[in-house]
Amino acid sequence: MKELRLMKGNEAIAEAAIRCGCDAYFGYPITPQSEILEYLMVEKPHERTGMVVLQAESEVASINMVYAGAGCGRKVMTSSSSPGVSLMQEGLSYCAGAELPCLLVNVVRGGPGLGTIQPSQADYFQSTKGGGHGDYRLIVLAPSSVQEMCDFVGLGFDLAFKYRNPALILTDGAIGQMMEKVMLPASVNRWTEEEIKQQTPWATTGKPADRPANVITSLELDSAKQEKVNQKLQAKYAEMEKNEVRFERIQCDDAEYLFVAFGTSARICQKSIDLARAKGIKVGLLRPITLFPFPKDEIEKLAGQVKGMLSVEMNAGQMVEDIRLNAKGKCPVEHYGRFGGIMPSPDEVLKVLEQKFIGG
């Protein structure tokens, strides 16, 4: 049955993984996402559902264990924070190239380098543009609440298996550490061996006597065949862009100015809207929920409606590039960001909007 609890965002992800039938979690501790692994170790899900939880020797080992588990048709996941996800990029590219469904959680911290353990959104490029080598994409979900941290685990797995592609929950240290009420889903049974065969006929499950084993690989040395592999992948990503765009519109219908923000920045902008409207300034918010596929059409539509867009991000200006590209010059697009784990205040965001567009 469903259950209401007060939980950290990281804990909600871990509990949701148990309840949605995840077969295995392979991870390595790093702040500010360590509670995911710690919660799973304490909960002992192998006793509840049979789920395997293993602390690997490194992030590199973790993502390669995910590759192996996904290749067997299992629901497998890992989590890390920015520097750790950097170490996983080669493995993620392999998973995408081999068309393996899996789930990764990145609880972003400030960089570059080791940076800070405070929250950031500076991994947008790494997540939405591929990060590793080759022409590949991840399905990227951006939660802005503890409830969505929970909900996006099941959604992430669903999309990963629908498209045979890695899915990524891109969150940050603020949402990972904050506590909110969350409605946990009812537990579902893990797939049986027969269900795995039915749901994932492509998986490798050994070599039965009556047929050759499926081979899971991202290697193709014939250039003509490799081009066809890439064309197939690009067609799949186009299908995602056609069918899987998700976003939230907040007070956009009469808006003359627009905030575009995801995650923690979107939460801040919601308060900025209240402050703006109290002053008679009609401001709305477009919150991308999928960062890939990105809400291109909605950006273009709203750009033709408003006098200006302000991309609010905890970085030097990453998502703003996608906004400008898709606004197509229909309105001015500006950026405001903070670094080093500093989060802008609602008053600060409103002041920037006034300075850039209204002359306040």
Image (tube, rainbow, N blue to C red):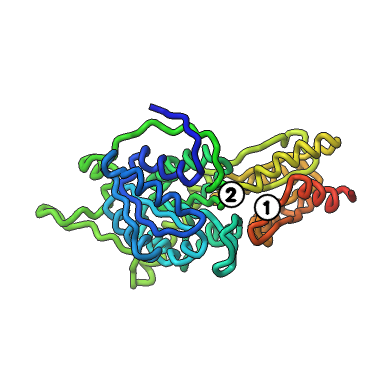
Count the numbered circles shown: 2
Residue drawn 70% across the image and 55% down it: 324
The answer to which quarter of the image holds residue 57 is: bottom left
**CB atoms of marks 2 and 1 within 8 Å:** yes
Image coords of residue 340 (percent x, y): 65, 61
Is residue 114 among the parts visible in the rendering? yes
Say whether disc 2 or disc 1 marks the residue closer to the N-terminus.
2
According to the picture, the residue beneath numbered tag 1 turns out to be 343
Q: Residue at x 72, y 43 (%)?
A: 302
The structure residue drawn at horizontal position 47% and vertical position 40%, both measured from the top left corner, is: 150
| Image quarter hosting the N terminus | top left
Q: Nearer the viewer, residue 208 or 60?
A: 60
Q: Is residue 332 above or below residue 229?
A: above
- Camera sees residue 228: no
- Mark 1: which amino acid? Met
Q: Which mark is residue 174?
A: 2
In depth, the one of 148 and 235 nearer the eye is 148
Extreme residue toward the right, this view: 359
User: Label 2 to label 1, Cα distance in Å?
Assistant: 9 Å
| Amino acid beneath label 2 | Ala
Instruction: List the single residue furthest toward the left.
Output: 209
Horizontal side of 157 relative to 298 (left or right) equals left
